[in-house]
Every structure is written in C-alpha cells, then in structure tokens.
C-alpha cells in the first residue's frame, strides 16, 4: 500500500510539473490594441530548427478557452506560397476581430465570438523561413520547396512539443487553406513517417483539414470552366464551344481554336473578384447593406454573400488574383509579389495586419524580432524562391486516409481561385465508397452547405455563399463544422 501511495504521489508531482511545462518566457502578458482580459493564455516566439543557419520559425499559440488539457491541438498554415499564417489569425478565425485605428494609431482588437480557440488549442505558424516573422540568418534557406518545407515544419513540431509536453496527449490535427493544400498533406506524411520511425516526442496525430486547397494540376486546372458555367458566368454556347474545342484539357490549349475559346472565358470573368464572385473587389459596410425595394429576389438569395463578421477589416481592391487557368505545376511557383512585380496581393488590402505587426510595441509583446532585424511583416512575401517538388497531392491523401487518418476537405462554393468543382472531383476520384450521400448540412437553423462522406474517414464539404477564406466570409458556419468534425460528430 505504501509503495502504491508513493507511486501515486510521484505521479501527481510529475503531473503538476507537466501541466506547468509551457515556457514562461513565451507567455504573452498583454496584447497591444486589446484592453480586456484574455479568455485563455497566449504564447508566442521562435523555435530554432537549424542552429548553424540561425533558422527560426515564428509561432503564435492560443490555448483553448474551453478545456485546454483535452481539446485538440491544431496547427494552422496559410498558403501562398509565401503568405503568413497571421492571415488566418487576423482576418479569419483568430481570437480577435481587428478594427482599423485612426491614421497613425494601432488597430483596436475585440474578442472574436467565432474564434477557433473557443474549442481547440491552435498554433499559427509562419512557414517556411523568410515568410511573415520567420527568418534565417543564412539566406540560402529562402530557396526552398514543398518537401523541405514539410521536413522543416515537422522539425518545428517535434521541438515545439518538447517545449509544451503537456499537450502531447491531446489529439493533434493539421489544418490550412489555399497553397496549404500542399503544405498540409506533405507535412502529415512527414509526421506519419516520424511516427513509423519512432521519433520522439510521439505526436498524437489524428488527421487533417484542407480548405479550398491546391491539390492536383489536372483537377485544379480543369475546375474553372465548369465552375464558371455552373455559376452563370459564361453562356451555354461558350461552354459547349469550349468542350468541343478543348477535349483534352481546359487549362492547356492544344490548338488555336481552344486557345481562343479559353480567352473568351477569361474575358467574361476577368473583372470579377476571384476570391469570392459574390463580392465586389472591396469590402465596406455600405456594400453589406442589402436594400429590399422592389427586388423580386428572395431574401435568402439576396443575403447569400453576407457575413457575420462585425468589422470591415479587409478591402478587396481589384479582380484578378492567381492567374486564371494556371494550376500549380512542378517547378518554381511564383509568389504574389513576383507575379505582380509589386508588394501587393491583388484584390487584397492588408493595412490592418500590416500596421499591427510592424508596430514596435506589438513585436515586443509577442516576442518577435524587430523590423530593424528581420524587416517588415508582409501578408505575402517575395523573399523566397519556392519550388513545387511534391507533385500531385492525391497520392498523399490516399496514403493517409487508407491508414485511417481523418480528412476533411472543405470549399467555399463561390471561390474562383480554387473552385469547389476541382476539390469535389478529386475527392471522388479516389474511388472510395460513399457512406454519407450528398446532403445539406445546417448552421444556426439554416442550410449552410453540402457534405458527402466517404469510407476511410474522408469528407468533402461545401460552405454556401463563401469565398476562398471560409472562416473570413462565414465565421459562424466555419466554427460549427470545425467543432463538429473535431468532436467526431455528424456535421
């Protein structure tokens, strides 16, 4: 009995130490621009993944507001390549809604009622080095690609969990959107390889989430024309002409007739907001006001593109984003600044995030290097030279799901950057048996989209009326499906 009690007290002592293991130096004690009390602990800082190069990846960790010891740990990655995951933190599902400050003053931060930290521990990671607040003292590290990024991020995870061992037993998921459609499955594959090899610490990896994600050259490339036709953006006649002239591919013209028809498609849609065809190329409170008047459109249709996000935090400025009909191919992937020969991402104004993250007091509060040391924070950087060297993601998805890892593939159904038609097609192409036939799913008592479930824990879900960054456009709906899926409940 004495031995048992001794073991019990030793266990309790180790448990106490375990709970308090998070590095106190990483604790954020105050957040400039926010005047209230944080609903949970926030940590941030650098993890050095290569000592000799001085290669450091920056993270911001938000502890769950619900039950941090049991809630999942989710790593969030934005895409680009070259875009900071503060995109997700500031504009999508982070703990705050940002309100633009007056000229020269910091944005004002308000608690976000639809933050994903309501139900999960979430790590926002700037990756690869050279993106956001992450950096390397050896600039050769800025020449990178899919496989190196996955390897580096896996190294980050192993080192991060060494610093936060109290979260090792929590279910762990990887999530991201856009070009993170490549980051997520390649990283998940690295994690699984590490588990197979017995690398320590042992991550409790359960699955992954991809939103409007780049996946496969053929499926992504062929998605735009059917999407444009289905949304009424091109005529029946043009659609039939394209099908006849381009029997092999909608994104690579095999003859002059095909090329001319595809140019007509481009002309018809060129002035639209590619991130959300329902939106003008800017956000403002005025645009959100939907007058009733004598409109014959039903209210549900007129409100399709509305969002519950309370503040106009991002301005969409001009229509063209990622070049139309240009799926990601093997080789160098141009970053936005490289495509546009400027530092601006088209259709996007990131003034709120830029003013906050380049403020000296903010950098100090979140334990980031100052601008004088690592330069300005940019939403999407041209600092890196990035190579797509992992090929199609379909083989990664198949290998992961066959092994039982859960996968949720979701799409805002009005995104023309990575249209849902491609994601729906490639998930179907895996050939898995349908176990949950196409049906609507609901949020707040309304149909919020549609879902189809496959064997091997694979689900494809659409979000009605949403653009490319689903939690930005539809925050309530995003939190609903995210929470249900993490809990293993039907969506």
Image: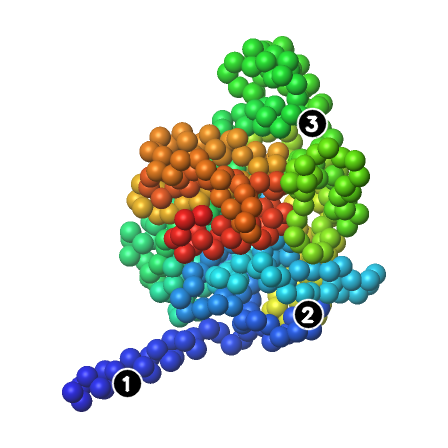
At 58% from the left and 58% from the top, the residue drawn is 114
Q: Please rate how many residues cluster around mark 1, counting C-alpha atoms within 10 Å: few if below 14, some from 14 to 19, many from 20.
A: few
Name which of mark 1 and mark 2 comes first in the sequence: 1
| Secondary structure state at the residue bearing disc 3 | helix
Q: How far apart, in angstroms, are the residues tagged by discs 1 and 3?
A: 68 Å
- Can you tell which quarter of the image residue 375 is in? bottom right
Label 2, on which residue? 34
Name which of mark 3 and mark 2 comes first in the sequence: 2
Label 3, on which residue? 269
Q: Is residue 309 visible?
A: yes
At 49% from the left and 34% from the top, the residue drawn is 423
| Residue 478 placement (x, y as % from top left) | 54, 50
| Residue 52 placement (x, y as % from top left) | 49, 60
291 vs 301, left or right, is: right
| Residue 450 placement (x, y as % from top left) | 50, 39
Name which of mark 1 and mark 3 comes first in the sequence: 1
| 395 or 92: nearer the viewer | 92
């Amino acid at each position: 009995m004495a031995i048992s009690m001794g073991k019990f007290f030793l266990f309790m002592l180790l448990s106490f130490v375990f709970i308090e293991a998070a590095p106190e130096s990483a604790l954020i004690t105050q957040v400039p621009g926010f005047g209230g009390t944080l609903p949970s602990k926030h940590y941030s800082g650098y993890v050095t993944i290569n000592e000799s190069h001085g290669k450091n990846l920056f993270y911001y960790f938000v502890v769950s507001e619900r039950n941090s010891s049991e809630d999942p740990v989710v790593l969030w990655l934005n895409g680009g390549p070259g875009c900071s995951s503060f995109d997700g933190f500031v504009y999508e599902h982070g703990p705050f809604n940002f309100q633009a400050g007056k000229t020269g003053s910091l944005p004002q931060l308000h608690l976000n009622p639809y933050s994903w930290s309501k139900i999960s521990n979430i790590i926002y990671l700037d990756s690869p080095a050279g993106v956001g607040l992450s950096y390397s003292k050896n600039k050769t590290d800025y020449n990178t690609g899919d496989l190196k990024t996955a390897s580096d991020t896996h190294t980050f995870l192993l080192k991060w969990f060494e610093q936060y061992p109290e979260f090792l037993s929590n279910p762990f998921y990887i999530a991201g959107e856009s070009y993170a459609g490549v980051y997520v499955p390649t990283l998940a594959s690295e994690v699984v390889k590490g588990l197979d090899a017995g690398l320590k610490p042992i991550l409790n990896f359960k699955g992954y989430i991809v939103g409007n994600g780049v996946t496969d050259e053929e499926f992504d490339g062929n998605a735009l024309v059917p999407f444009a036709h289905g949304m009424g953006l091109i005529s029946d006649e043009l659609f039939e002409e394209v099908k006849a002239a381009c029997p092999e591919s909608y994104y690579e013209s095999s003859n002059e007739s095909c090329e001319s028809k595809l140019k007509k498609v481009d002309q018809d849609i060129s002035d639209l907001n590619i991130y959300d065809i329902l939106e003008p190329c800017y956000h403002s409170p005025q645009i959100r006001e939907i007058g009733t008047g004598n409109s014959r459109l039903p209210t549900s249709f007129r409100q399709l593109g509305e969002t519950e996000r309370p503040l106009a935090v991002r301005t969409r400025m001009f229509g063209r984003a990622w070049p139309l009909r240009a799926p990601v191919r093997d080789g160098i992937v141009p970053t936005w600044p490289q495509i546009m020969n400027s530092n601006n991402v088209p259709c996007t104004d990131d003034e709120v995030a830029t003013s906050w993250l380049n403020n000296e007091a903010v950098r100090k509060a979140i334990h980031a290097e100052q601008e004088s040391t690592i330069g300005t924070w940019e939403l999407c950087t041209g600092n890196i030279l990035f190579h797509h060297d992992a090929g199609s993601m379909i083989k990664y998805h198949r290998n992961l799901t066959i092994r039982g890892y859960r996968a949720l593939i979701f799409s805002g159904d009005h995104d023309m950057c990575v249209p849902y038609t491609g994601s729906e097609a490639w998930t179907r192409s895996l050939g898995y048996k349908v176990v949950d036939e196409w049906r609507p799913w609901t949020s707040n008592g309304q149909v919020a989209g549609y879902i189809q479930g496959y064997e091997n824990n694979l689900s494809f879900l659409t979000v009605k009326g949403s653009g490319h960054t689903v939690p930005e456009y539809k925050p309530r709906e995003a939190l609903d499906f995210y929470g249900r899926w993490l809990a293993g409940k039907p969506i």
